[in-house]
Image (cartoon, rainbow, N blue to C red):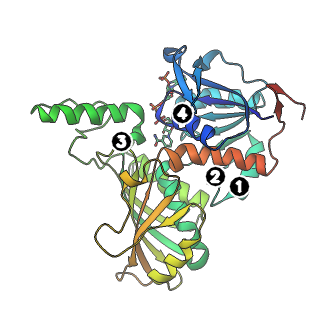
Amino acid sequence: MGYRVAVVGATGAVGREILKTLAERRFPVSEIVALASPRSAGSEVSFGEERVLTVKNLETFDFKGWDIALFSPGASISAIHAPRAAAAGCVVIDNTSQFRMDPDVPLVVPEVNPEALAQFSNRNIIANPNCSTIQMVVALKPLHDEFRIKRIVVATYQSVSGAGKEGMDELLANTKVHYVHDKNPPQVFQKDIAFNVIPQIDHFMDDGSTKEEWKMAVETKKILDPKIAVIATCVRVPVFIGHAEAVHVEFELPVTAGQARAALRDAPGVTVHDQRLDGGYITPAEAQGEDAVFVSRIRKDPTVEHGLAMWIVSDNLRKGAALNAVQIAELLIEQKLLPRMAVTGTAAPA
Ligand SMILES: NC(=O)c1ccc[n+]([C@@H]2O[C@H](COP(=O)([O-])OP(=O)(O)OC[C@H]3O[C@@H](n4cnc5c(N)ncnc54)[C@H](OP(=O)(O)O)[C@@H]3O)[C@@H](O)[C@H]2O)c1
């Protein structure tokens, strides 16, 4: 007994991680289909250790009778096919930016705002936040509950896998040519990403911020609290997987580093690794393949009244995308919000 699950964008960095996560967490699947563009229809992707799925063409796929679709094919493709799947009765969990700020679509991080999930029936679509937002709000929610956040100043160090499989290919290719004293013209990124850092992710907005920086601000408000002020600087770094963030937080109430550490110690999804000695913190390479959001370097910010500084790291493909999406699907089951459960591949009546 299980659900009929579609993974859309299954050949991509996020889609492959979704398939891996579903298998690892033994998500109750009675049937699973991998969907992508016509370019990769017929190719194969792994589902767990033993199963291989033949990729099907999203354009011609009929979602009728399918229970859940986990989408990560890019915003413009989700814009067309997510509403089509939703209209066919399939609940969509979308990883792209397409629906995140739609007031009728809940933007959910299960550890932070599980109560928002119930609104999914407005459109049959649930949005997964941006990878950088997810790890930040998971770590800040327990601190907001206790000490009330007023303002967040964050600088990100985001890995190239945040730009998908082509981003990873470009870092590898550009790094190789550096060793032969040559350079590749950048295609995915705005400048050479090898041995460099780039202070631009997504396109520029009218106010001089980038869309990634805007997303961190508006998504944090939607998920955590509209009153919180957020200013972000988002930077691409030559790391394959794992995003890091230097986060400076101003609170309404007094807070010490020790109180913050205590509040985070038992928080869901958070691992505090904070030793004040050489190497006593987590780096992106160590977070790769892990589920947790790691918090290190917690210390007082003496430049504001009630301030803390900290270092937050997580695997952007896991908690930043696939794991969060699968946790949302699990929450739908837990809260008995799925309209039906398929039995041996056939959708049962509601
Ligand atoms: N990477 C991250 O850390 C991350 C985190 C959160 C959210 N996201 C979002 O998730 C989405 C995917 O990211 P990604 O990193 O997985 O990108 P990716 O590695 O480039 O993969 C893109 C996927 O979309 C599919 N696709 C492209 N055009 C399509 C079409 N016309 N019809 C059907 N499928 C199509 C691709 O299939 P083909 O192989 O057939 O081209 C591939 O499976 C993006 O919107 C991204 O912003 C990414």
> What crowding class fits label 3: few (fewer than 14 Cα within 10 Å), some (14-19), or many (20 or more)?
many
Mark 2 or mark 4, whichever is nearer to me: 4
Where, quadrant-wise, is the N terminus in this rendering? top right
Q: Is mark 4 within 8 Å of ligand 1?
A: yes
Q: Which residue is mark 2?
A: 108
Identified by mark 3, the residue type is: Val
Q: Is mark 1 within 8 Å of ligand 1?
A: no
Of tags 1 and 3, the one toward the viewer is 3
Mark 3 secondary-structure assignment: helix
Residue under label 1: 116
Q: Are marks 1 and 3 in contact (CB under 8 Å)?
A: no
Report if residue 254 is visible in the image: yes
* Kind of residue at disc 1: Ala
Q: Mark 2 or mark 1: name the one nearer the start of the chain.
A: 2
- Real-space CA distance between mark 1 and mark 3, rounded to the nearest whole angstrom: 31 Å
- C-beta proximity under 8 Å, tags 2 and 4: no
Under circle 1, the secondary element is helix
Proximity of marks 2 and 1: CB atoms separated by less than 8 Å: yes
Q: Is tag 1's residue or tag 3's residue first in the polypeptide sequence?
A: 1
Give the distance between the C-alpha atoms of the residues marked 2 and 1, in whole angstroms: 7 Å
Residue 33, position as x, y percentages in the image:
65, 24
| Identity of the residue drawn at 40% across and 40% down | 161
Structural distance between the alpha carbons of marks 3 and 4: 16 Å
- Write down the residue under mark 3: 160
Nearest to N terminus: mark 2 or mark 3: 2
| Residue type pointed to by label 2 | Val
